[in-house]
Structures are given as structure tokens and as C-alpha cells.
Image (cartoon, grey):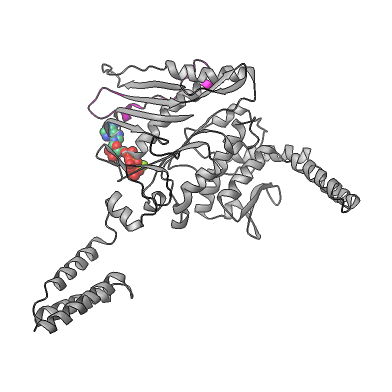
Amino acid sequence: MQIKTVSLKQLGPFTELEATFAPTDDVKGNVTVFIGNNGAGKTSILKALATSLSWFVARVRSEKGSGSPIPEGVILNGFPSAAIDITLLDNHDFQAGQCTENNTGIYQWLLAKTASGKKANYISSLNDVTRLADVYRTALTFNEKTNLPLIAFYPVERVVLDIPLKIKEKHTFLQLDGYDNSLSQGVDFRRFFEWFREREDSENENSLPQAVIEALSIAVGNDPDIWKKLQSVMASSKDRQLTAVRAAISHFMPGFSNLRVRRKPRLHMSIDKGKQTLNVLQLSQGEKSLMALVGDIARRLAMMNPALENPLEGDGVILIDEVDMHLHPSWQRNIIKRLTMTFPNCQFILTTHSPLVISDCKDVLVYSLDEGELNQQPSQYGVDVNSVLLNVMDTNIRNAEINQRLNDLLDMIQEIDSAEKVKRVQDALGDLERELPVDHLEIAKAKMFLRKKELKYAQDN
Ligand SMILES: Nc1ncnc2c1ncn2[C@@H]1O[C@H](COP(=O)(O)OP(=O)(O)OP(=O)(O)O)[C@@H](O)[C@H]1O
Ligand SMILES: [Mg+2]
């Protein structure tokens, strides 16, 4: 499933906004990133997509299900109604339980909201969302193991690590539960923890006890064929869904492995970081939020793709607001690469304030938002961060006052035509030098420029 386009009408800060999402004819990857100032409307776009997609989720659950309405406060001030018009491509076609591909699977629906006491400008038209959900419900009826597309929105308020110390009752986790809270709060770590514990219990029940493994390995000796068989029996007793989650975390966060639930001294979740074993609550904020995000996506994919050997290859749409949140620059740099490598068949729609996020990936569709206008930006792949800040994010690359003083200094050097002016430049240069760090590149450049000018002035006079 992929979102192709969305059109927002009189919603949030937008009178009318149309966006096309990657992959497009010229951008082959499946990542779209929105950048823009505070209040430009990035979150509004993601929220609108989540609202619209919630109708699909609701109607997969039940034929007449209702998703979230557009909140009244989101209707553009001064207008009676707002609408979200979405177009999706879903080329799954399930015939008698068999999945075939159908390239014309375009679905379009419009969700509208009118303020109370006003006359409507737009009327909801949700036939296609029913038709699309019907495709999946029919398929599930024929075959319980039909894969479902993941749809998830991770807002800025995504909660991090809420681990219940006691779990009173056991949940059963069904495939459709992969959609629980996926569009409202994103990371649901409490549920993640409960799910992990339940899967781990069943994994432990199905696996051979350690003592048996040890006894068998002594009995087997060095026979390579029997060893291979024993290993494959041991591997098959691993829970496929848990394996997917553990793999996603190790893949995404090299150095981290073996996420598990521990019962002593009290119930907690632990993970190995290099050679150390840590309670996940001991991880840093950045580590926690990444682990929770990746774990949540992987868990949902694992639940929703019972027919896939590797559930991380499941498809879906993932919306992440401020994807750079809490991340060190080196993590910001490769977050898109890691997401797309770990979850290769998901479409990502992201927002960011970081030039690093968009300068390290080739096939990314970048839009900047400015006063309600959407502008596609040329690829920033390999562009240095200063240029991205200057050209795309419309921001000074350094403190504005220092920038002004450096520019003034260069102008003064350029205009040197007297010994008095040389002295003035030297004084200004000395003042700046005292305020800036040693080895400041622009000061070194200005000094060289001044030296050249001084020589030229000496020669000419
Ligand atoms: N009903 C409305 N009518 C008019 N403008 C609105 C309405 N609702 C929200 N806005 C405007 O839309 C903007 C909200 O934008 P949004 O939260 O999407 O910004 P953002 O790009 O995500 O910013 P940030 O980077 O700070 O998260 C606000 O500036 C607000 O003034
Ligand atoms: Mg925002």
C-alpha cells in the first residue's frame, strides 16, 4: 500500500495544499520528507494523513467502522468546512485467498468536516475506503494468514518506555491488534512489553531446555550433519515474530542485541549493549526512543504479516513527526537509510528540522513548506550541511551577528586604500579573533586575504 497524493482543503494552516508522495516518476525511493519553519504545517499534514487512514483501519476491523473525524478546531479559521482527499495505490488482489498483483489498484476517498451550525462546502465520500478494506476483509475470511498493511503514525508526543511492573492478566494478541493505537499514540511500549513477554513465554515453552541441549551436544560429538540438524531444530523453536523484532533492533542499532524480559529481581526488560547487560530503563533518552520506535514498527509488522518468512518485509505506511528528535547528528545522518534498510517495503512520510536527515540519502523526496506553499527541493544528497541550511532551510549557517561582522570585515579588506584603513581592519580582525574559537576558518581566510591586500597596497605605493 502506498499513498500517492493528498489534497488538503481549508485545513489547519492551508487553504489548499496538494502533495504527491514518493515513489514518483523521478524519485524511486519510498521516503518523503517535509521541512519548514515552526508552524509551517508539517505536523498538520501528517495528522491529516493519519485521520484519513484511520478510516481504512476501522473498516478493516468492521464493515461499517468509523475512523477519527477531522477535529473541528482544524478547520481553517473563517471557513465552514475542511476536507482531506487522499489517493492510494494498493495492488493486492486476493482471489480465493491467493494474493495476486493488480497494478490499477487506485483508491480515492474524501473525508470532510463542517463546523456546527455552518453549511457544508465538502461532503465525505468514503466508498473507496470501504472497497479497499473489503478487499482485505474478504481475503482474511478466506485465509486467516493474509498479510495486512501496517499503518502507523508516530507523533512528537510518542511516549517512551512505560513498562508495567506487574501484569495482572494475560492478553491474547490477534493479528488485527497490530493496529491498536497505531494512529493515535504511535509507540505503545506497554503493549510492546506485554506482547514480548507473552511471545517469549511461548518461545520458552516450545524450545528445548538448556540441559537437554547440553546433553545432546555431548552425545552428538563432532558429527557435522547431526550438528546441522540440531541447530535447525533449535532455530525453528525460536519465535518468528520475536526474531523479527530482535533482528530489527540489532540491525538498526548495531551493538545492541538480545532484547529479553527478565523476572528477577523484578519484572523488567533487558538488552545487551556491547558486553554489558542493561535494564532498558538505563538506556539514554535517544537510545530508548529509537529502540521503542523500531521495536514498535517491527512488532506491528510481525503481528500483521503471519504469512511472511521475514515479517520485516511487510508493507505499509509509516508517518514519523520530527524523526530527528533526541538523535545525535551521526544518527540523524543515517536514520533514513536505517529505516529503509530495516523496513524495505514500507512507505515513510517524515518531517524534520535537521539538515543532516536530508543530506545523506539519494532517493528522497524533500518538500519545503513556506506560508502554505509546498516546494519540491532538489536532491540534497552529498550536499554539505551549511549549504542545506542556507539553500533549503533558509537559515544562517552561523550566528547572525558574527556573520554580519565577518561580512563587514571582508568588505573593509576589499576597500583598503590607505594605511589608516589597514590599521582599522587589523583592529576589527583582532576584536573578532578574541571572541571566536582558535583556528576559526573564516578568521584564517580573512587573515590571508588581508595579507594579500597589504602586500598589494605596499607594492602600489
Ligand atoms: N484552524 C486553523 N486555522 C488557521 N490556522 C491554523 C489552524 N490550526 C492550526 N493553524 C496554524 O497551523 C500551524 C500549525 O502547524 P503545525 O503544527 O502543522 O506546524 P509544524 O510545521 O509541525 O511546526 P513545528 O515545526 O513547530 O512542529 C500553526 O502555526 C497554527 O497557527
Ligand atoms: Mg510539528
Quarter of the rendering occupied by the C terminus = bottom left
Q: Which residue is drawn at 58% across and 52% down?
A: 281
Q: Which residue lies furthest to the right in this view?
A: 219
Classify 44 as above or below 136: below
Image position, residue 446 (x, y; %): 23, 73
Q: In which quarter of the image is residue 96?
A: top right
| Chief secondary structure of the magenta portion | loop
Left or right: residue 164 versus residue 36 is right
Residue 28 visible in the snapshot: yes
Q: Closer to the camera, 385 or 182? A: 385
Q: Closer to the camera, 306 or 457? A: 457
Is 139 colored magenta in this rendering? no
Classify 399 as above or below 132: below
Q: Residue at x 40, y 24 (%)?
A: 69
Image position, residue 296 (x, y; %): 55, 40
Range of magenta residues: 60-82
Image position, residue 347 (x, y; %): 47, 36
Q: In which quarter of the image is residue 241?
A: top right
Q: Quadrant of residue 368?
A: top left
Q: Which residue is drawn at 68% across and 49% down?
A: 266
Classify 73 as above or below 228: above
Image position, residue 216 (x, y; %): 88, 48
Left or right: residue 439 versus residue 459 is right
Q: Residue at x 11, y 78 (%)?
A: 421
Is 76 colored magenta in this rendering? yes
Residue 393 visible in the snapshot: no
Q: Quadrant of ligand 2?
A: top left
Left or right: residue 458 versus residue 440 is left
